[in-house]
Image: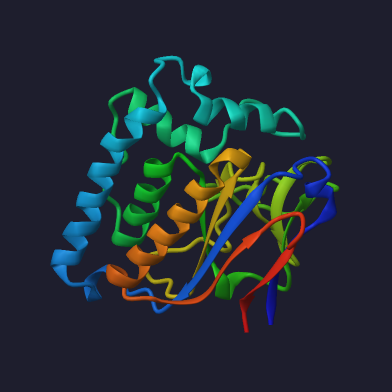
Amino acid sequence: MKKFVVEDSFWELFPDVTIGVLVVDGIKPTDQIDPELVARAEKELKRANIAARKWVPDPTISKNEAAAVWREAYRKFKTKKGVRSSVENLLKRVLKDNPVGHINPAVDTSNAVSLTYALPIGVENVDAIEGTFRLKMTEGGDEFLAVGEEVSDPTLPGEIAYIDDAGAVCRCWNWRDGQRTEATDETPHCMFIMENIDPARVDDLHAAIDQMEAYATEILGAHTTNKDYLTIDHKETLIDE
């Protein structure tokens, strides 16, 4: 069994966070998905790029609440200089009239959910996770090779990161994923993770996870193996049996 555990070092900083977890298996590669469903995924992404405009009414990204709450959160732990939440990076593109583009159905649908609800989403290859998957404040030195890079960039002491028994999986909370657990078009067994730091938006998180589950079932051809919400009162869940 593989578990996802959010450790106390995280909850000490962020006691009000809720983390949505959706684990699915059987995601089909693009060439095995009905072309009409591939087109639907791309259409959903285009719609979401438009819908996301409501989250950035101010042309200065930091003045929009959806980005500001994450900037405030990132001040509470050690980060690499200038890093931002993954959802801010998506919303910046909306502000710049540079829509998030089509990649493949799995990426399109997850980006669509993130844009629609202005919540960060991460996608990991469950089969590539080694041992226990954890969210914690690190002691530093966890090996990490970012997607698209060739040189390891280990975690910093005091950084919030997702890690497993082999090293870091995602740096600076939800800023950047690593190559080792990257989900590709050929990855059937995935975990989608969404984080909400505003207690007033817990319903949005639940709606976002429900939407991702619907996309995974209806478009990607997958089936759910676990759907859960981690809080300070419920700190772990299974991701693979």
Task: Look at the image and name its color scheme.
Answer: rainbow
Along the viewing direction, whichever of 129 and 5 lies nearer the viewer: 5
Classify 219 as above or below 113.
below
Q: From where the camera sits, is residue 138 visible?
A: no
Give the residue drawn at x 38%, y 58%. Answer: 211
Task: Find residue 110 and report its horizontal and vertical position in percent.
Answer: 39, 54
Give the residue drawn at x 28%, y 25%. Answer: 97
Residue 76 is left or right of residue 33, and the answer is right
Give the residue drawn at x 51%, y 17%. Answer: 63
Task: Find residue 111 and report its horizontal and vertical position in percent.
Answer: 38, 48
Considering every residue shown, the one lying at the far left of the view is 36
Place residue 238 in its image quadrant: bottom right
Give the residue drawn at x 67%, y 41%. Answer: 172
Classify 213 as above or below 66.
below
Classify 215 as above or below 103.
below
Query: Where's the N terminus, which quadrant?
Result: bottom right
Query: Where's the C terminus, which quadrant?
Result: bottom right
Place residue 70 in its image quadrant: top right
Q: From where the camera sits, is residue 65 visible?
A: yes
Classify 49 as above or below 229.
above
Task: Find residue 240 and report its horizontal and vertical position in percent.
Answer: 61, 79
Task: Find residue 183 and report its horizontal and vertical position in percent.
Answer: 47, 63
